[in-house]
Image: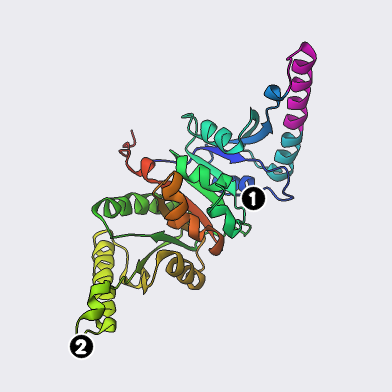
Amino acid sequence: MRKYTNILVVYEPKRDKQVALERALDFARYNSKVNITVLRLVYDYSQDIHLVTKSYDTSREEVTAQHIATVEKTINEYKKDATVNIRPKVLWTRELGEGIVDEMNSGSYDVLIKGANHHGILDSIIFTPIDWYVLRNARIPVIIAKEHEWTPGRPIVVAVDFTSEDKRRYNVSLLREAQLLATITGGTIHLVNSAPVVLPAIMLEVPNYAPEIYAENILKEHKKRLLEFAAVHNVPAERCHIAEGLPDDVIPALCKSLKPEVVFIGSAGRQGMAAALVGNTCEEIVDYIDADLIVLNHGYLDEPVKKEE
């Protein structure tokens, strides 16, 4: 079973509060073996100058030392008297997203924690925000941390999907990860599911056809699958929640009433034009859920789970 022991935290110099570091320390309260690496990304300007000289190398070393000192100061402010192994790391890179992805996929970490950023509507069409780039390329779980107090015992939501056989299989992997967190925090697992009703255009031409009956049947079928899944995995029926609509509308609405600590969701990891036009549910809802979002890319979910020795 996977354990979040080696944690990579993204340091964000322009923010007054280091939410990701706070969340990593929350994990450390439940696991004394946690090792935290605080990553400070610095723009690599070596290609912007025509001649790399000794003075350049010296200035780079000085800048690195300054950033290390700044990160260490921040670590001491947040760490206080806690006996946690935290180390700063400075990485020079020309692309922040690529720098994070290269470091987190190096094989040295179990989970990445990054503070949430708010995106404008144009970001999803023209640009790829750093958060989204990281989610699409992650081979380890990614936690998008929000600014709220982490309280043990609060609900832990798992967003399940029954629209394909692969997604049914991913549901089990998501649930296992959530159960691991629930075990150490005392949280309760809640399953949420949406029932998107897409009415075939040809059905509108059928005499005496009732769209509301079609929608009701779709909802019943989704509810049946949800309750069957919950029964197999010992999740009480009263902790199963479903509503008609698209995932990016239903999941935030359900979470608003459940007030979870964490939401687990899978990401398809789409790239290029598919990502711009179709999008991923986790990218659509990240700004609308007042809880930490733990995203597991399908590349990670496809890997076999190693048994504990």
Q: Magenta region's main secondary structure?
A: helix
Q: Count how many numbered circles sit on residues in the image.
A: 2
* Percent position of residue 10, x then y: 61, 41
**Picture coordinates of residue 268, whole percent (x, y):** 39, 49
**Which x, y percent locates residue 81?**
70, 42
Report the residue at 32% width, 36% height from top: 306
On the question of residue 134 being in view, the answer is yes
Q: Which range is magenta? A: 49-69
Q: Is residue 279 visible?
A: no
Q: State the mark number for residue 208.
A: 2
Q: Residue placed farthest to the left in the image?
A: 207
Amino acid type assigned to the residue bearing label 2 in the image:
Asn
Tag 1 or tag 2, which sits nearer the N-term? 1
Q: Quadrant of the N terminus?
A: top left
Q: Is residue 71 above or below residue 27?
A: above
User: Which amino acid, mark 1?
Assistant: Val
Residue 65 sits inside the magenta stretch: yes
Q: Secondary structure at mark 1?
A: helix
* Residue placed most toward the observer, 129 or 18: 129
In the displayed structure, 88 sits above or below 178; it is above
Q: Is residue 274 above or below residue 92?
A: below
Quickly name the residue at label 1.
19
- Residue located at (32% from left, 54% from top): 171
